[in-house]
Image: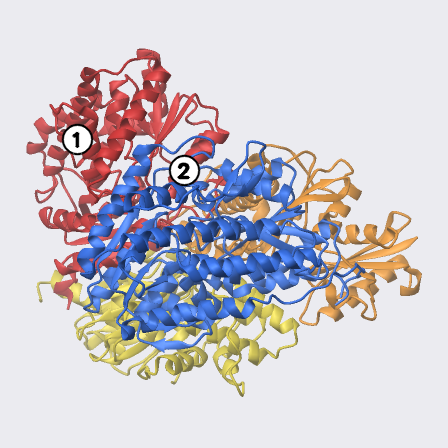
Chain colours: A orange, B yellow, C blue, D red
Amino acid sequence: MITAGVDVGAKFAKVVILKDGQVVARAKTLVGFDVLKSASDVFEKALKEAGLSRGDVQRVVATGMGRNTVLHNQPINADEVVSEVVADAAGANQVVPTVKTVIDVGAEEGRGIKVEVGKVKDFVINERCAAGAGTFVEAMARALEVKVEDMGPLSLKSANTIPMNAQCCVFAESEVVSLIHSKISKEDIAKAIHDAIAGRISSMVLRMGVEKDVVLIGGCALNPGFLPPLEKELHTNIIVPEYPEYVSALGAAVIAAKPAR
Amino acid sequence: MKMAQAEVKTQEYWRWPEYRRTVTEKDWRNASILTAGVDIGSVGSKATVMVDGELYAFAVMRTGGVSEDTAIKVTSWALEGTGLEAGKLHYVVGTGYGRVNVPFAKKTITEIACHARGAHYIYGPTVRTVLDIGGQDCKAIRCDEKGKVLSFLMNDKCAAGTGRGLEVFSDLISVPISELGKVSLSVDQEPPPVSNTCVIFAKAESLALLRQGWPKEKVAAAYHAAMADRIVDLLTRVGIEKDFVITGGVAKNTGIVQRLERILKIKPLEPKMDPILAGALGAGLFAKALYEKEQGLR
Amino acid sequence: MTATTQVKEYPTEPLKCWEQAKNLRKNYYEDYLHAHEKGGLRWAGGAWSFSAIPAGLGEDVYCITGEPYGATVAFFKDFASKCHDATEAAGFPRTLCAYMRNYWGSILLDKYILTDGTVVDGYPVPNFIWQNHICCSHSKWYQLVKWLEKKKGKEVPMYSVDVSVGYPSDFSPEEDYKVNYIVEQLNDGINWLEKVTGRKYNDALLCDAVWNEMKATSVWAEVCALNQAVPAPLDEKTMYSLYVMGTLMKHRPECVAFYETLREEVKDRIKRGIAAVSTERFRVITDTQPPWGFLKIFREMEKYGAVSVGSLYTFGLIGMWQYQPDGTWTPKPLPPKKPQTRDEALQTIVRWTLHKPEWAHFYEPELKTKMMESIVKQWKVNAVLLHYNRGCEGLSLHIAENRYGLMQTGIPVFPFEGNMGDERDFDLAGTMARLNAFFESMGLKKLKE
Amino acid sequence: MINEVFAQFRQWIDNRHEYAKAWKEKTGNRVVGYLCTYVPEEILYAADILPVRILGSHEPPTVTEPYIFAMYCHFCRDCLAQGLKGKFDYLDGIVEGQSCLHLRQTFNAWRLHIPIDYTYYIYVPHGVQTVRAIPYLTQELVKFKQSLEKWTGKNITNQDLDKGIHVMNRNRELMRKVSEYRKTNPPKLTGLEAMEMVLASQMVDKEEHSRLLEQLLQELPNRKLKRRGDIRLMIIGSEDDDRVFMKNVEDLGATFVIDEHCTGTRYFWDNIKEGQEDRLAALASRYVMRVPCPSKDWPEFTRLKHAVQLAQEYGAKGALIIQNKFCDPHGIEIPPLRDALAAVGVQTYPLEFDVTVPWGQFRTRVEAFLEQLTGLEELF
């Protein structure tokens, strides 16, 4: 059976195509103002990579905040939509069958999900004033005049701890600027930023409690500076699967492969 | 308002132009007191060179990662081509977020005091309320006929009313930051403001509107309206009294200015010179006073 | 939009006493507004205050209680946001109790809002303030009302009663020294009332009012208990318009009469199997005040066939309950006889009030968790929605502990952040998205619309 | 010598946990933590218990999320975080004297989630302006005393109570005497030193602390404190142990000459009448009549009157109003406080403290406020 999962996120749209449980294609693209177009393009890209056409795909399930734009809507014409929470759980369970806790940190949103064999037991999502780590790192990178992708590696160069309140991006940024003015090294500041986000995410996840195995997914899982402080905060080691940013789309594809509910 | 277009370097949308200018034909060589005010803001840095308390030359550029370097760069750029060297300046005062990092400044004074005094210089002694919309904060200042601060307030969290907010936004809708205000006014009727007063959320909300197919102009209008609302809150808290003036880079954003005018029903005074210089001008004037004090001239 | 499923539908019909409720509430606000024209007295204070006491001053004494007024303001978002701006402009932090800020804003703007949203010029100044100190803010709230009015040149005398003695167990008698601490304050308060109003105090009226309050709060509990029926005859959104009578005039005969009528109608609905929500198939309860400006979240729930059958808030703020030895939670019956003297009346009402569930759990999170657990069991509830309410320090107290406690017992919990009175703290889109995810994780799908 | 004394205070604060553990070791007695200054430490001293105040660490309290919703003040969460992290694992008990809802939550979370031998909540009345409060609190203290006797197995006699009352009175008396030296110009001690004196007193054995205070009092008169600038400031708020902030502000050329904090003068301002037959009634009246926390200060604003009086007696030119974010009782009083001080010519500036203090931003505000106070006169 061939199915596809489409994750129309805040920043990126991702597609995963599954053939009998095996991933045959992955593709992602930035989401522009025209969400449908961005999603359709990346869907095409994935089909091409798999050497398939839309007709070959039996079921398509969409997730992510833009999921409804592709539901029953050509050319993707998704058969069903599921929330990010459900997709994350299914996807994480696919890549790490022993998973009990999923942490998904994306551009705009952070999520913690308690999972039991792929089913959601409990979940938390960051509330207002705790904007996603992605956006946060971007804003801080600009203040530091450092490339976003360099932030993580930079933070790993520092061993110092500077307490910082990451609740509010706007305020945190001026904390960063005053750190810059008071001659704190970029390495230390970068670390402080990652520590702060890790603290914020972990305190959110702690609301529902953490059970092993813990899996970290989402775009920010690609940021190496993020894992060490998070593991420290949660007092546990965390598994980062291959292609962490695709796990939600994978989950959607997995759900698509299940008999329609 | 005339602006030297020479030497302007424009970069990405959010990057506002950097520029320098010599404003008078006067020769500094005939002057008795040479001072400078260096305003290292969180986003922009400005240097004013003043001869006998009159603006002579200035430069405006972005604040870099190392504020010492920026301080030196912006000051020497202001002096460029004037034949005047930094060493010849009698007194330099640093102000702004990075004021402590102006190596050649003899004293630092806060941007609050400097903006009040600078506004007094730009707009004259009738100024009672100064609004400074800076890169990262927004200040509402009440001052007396001498330009002395009576009271002030700065924005707290949850205020999108800052220059940085506009940078983020201009990037988002890919409109040069200097055009934003104009664009935001090009709607036939005002849409409801974006509900969010937080830079991050306002951006997310604007993005959602764009994806719903709203035209850029309309989204810009909604964003500017929200900003204006926040700024008005701050002004009412400090208590607004005529004459009212706006300083800082955002004073050039007609989208904000006209909306403030509409809500407050008070027309801000027309600036006689670049209002982004207010802080640096105030610092330059304090520098003169401090030099005179040092020399026992007052 | 999403894949949908079919469920059986129950018959439903609007409440017959709905109009009566609407008018009661409308008249209440207007009676207060026009009290002086009829030579009557106006007083202001909290919904938790011992409102039966001022009743002894005569039958022409009208009050406006602060929390319901703050909620009414919140319901009309534009007016509310003007109120917030006014209080912030006056220098108050925006993190303070939202009802309080709405109320102050109304005074600062010198405008008064009616239940239909009509804004009247000139805030009606009370003759005196009669309050209870139940949380960090309750007396401070009115201390500032006094201060704000004074700045306008108006003297408003204030009396507030401290009740912070903890709460008594259902199975052992109240401690006398604690009860007497409050009774003595009430006694002093009566002398104070006579002084500031120049009126002679009438103990017979007091006894009636006390008895009314006890009846009203006991009958309301019975109404809530009836909602254990499946399908639920009442949904919480409707109950908001009913419990409110108890927050406005729990000591008045109209209130008792209304709750008795309501009780009979609800019994009848159960007999005829009338549902509040025809598609009921998933029962939830909430906690603390809702974000008043966004009651549409309840409509959103109904799209999934989910109905809120109540909350500890609506049940326990106005209803009086008690635990039975077998562990069931039941309406608290009236004592054998109506109080006949001032002292009896004060003793009785104090002992009664100290058991108020919403008050008791201010002291111990376990108690609140236990009561919610009982509701889940007895009202056949599938999940609990916890409103992390930034607007109310009192009712959000221990809410994280309650989430934790309920999770331990295996009850599904959906927490969401918001504010009962300040929309800036509530993220509608975000909350809807999370709610959606929650119902999906509960295996629910949207029903055909 | 003086500097050694202040150094000792600092040393005690920085090593408070080690101190308490060593004290237990040395005396074999119990240590009890308290959350609010409404806990009558006299009775604990009477029971040979060392009372220590629980304070935070100024790091984002990430571990408290499951137990306290983040709309409650950072102080109550920070305190709980210390407990959850095991920093106070040596405590035999924890006692709260009813003040605000925030700390009540800390108390309950501690009771429920942190292993501890003894917990007690004293229902200290809020109606401290009513005549009914003292007899009621007396009853509460009787119960508290009984509960301590049951726990420790020690019968607390009147002599014990007299000892406890005396230990506390003497310490408060001495700290008031030291405060007198903040009136001189320049003052004989900085605001930071004054804060560290009180914080230390809340963490160590009062008798040991009092001995140092006596040394201090002998030498303070001759102390020449060099201060850059002479702007006399007052600092007002709830709990505040932010020593870094104090230092930063005083480095800008100002000196805090007086405070109204429960980690400052509010803690030691009022004494207990000694030699009363009913000791507990005497205690009750002290805790009812003391400079109140705003949560208990209604319907009259007695604390405002007190703050104004302090500002005048100590010649403060301006005052910083510190608002611990989410503290309703203090937040509510900001405008009345502002007006009351303005009426006597003391300008104020409000600052909202959160778990971390963004000094970069606050620096500008504080400096500008100081410039406003001096008016930069000669430069216009």
In front of the other: D136 or A1: D136
Residue C61 x, y percent position in the rendering: 30, 64
Tell me the quadrant of the picture where the C terminus of chain A can be found. bottom right
Pointers 2 and 1 in contact (CB under 8 A)? no
Dividing the picture into quadrants, the one containing residue B20 is: bottom left
> Left or right: C414 with respect to D109?
right
Q: Secondary structure at mark 2?
A: loop
Chain where mark 1 sits: D
In the picture, the disc for residue B191 is none
Residue drawn at point x = 45 percent, y = 72 percent: C78
**Amino acid on which disc 1 is placed:** Arg
Dividing the picture into quadrants, the one containing residue C176 is: top left
Residue drawn at point x = 46 percent, y = 44 percent: C334
Chain where mark 2 sits: C
Same chain check for tags 2 and 1: no
Residue D170 x, y percent position in the rendering: 15, 26
- Whether residue A180 can be seen here: no
In front of the other: A5 or C60: C60
In front of the other: D129 or D263: D129
> Left or right: B128 with respect to D273?
right
Residue C127 x, y percent position in the rendering: 25, 64
- Image depth: mark 2 or mark 1 in front: 2
Q: Residues within 10 Å of mark 2 (few under 14, many from 20)?
A: many
Residue drawn at point x = 42 percent, y = 71 percent: C27
In the picture, the disc for residue C167 is 2
Residue C357 in the image: above or below residue A136: above
- Number of numbered discs visible in the structure rendering: 2
**Amino acid on which disc 2 is placed:** Tyr
Residue D74 x, y percent position in the rendering: 41, 44
Q: Residue furthest left?
A: D222
List the residue tagged with mark 1: D172
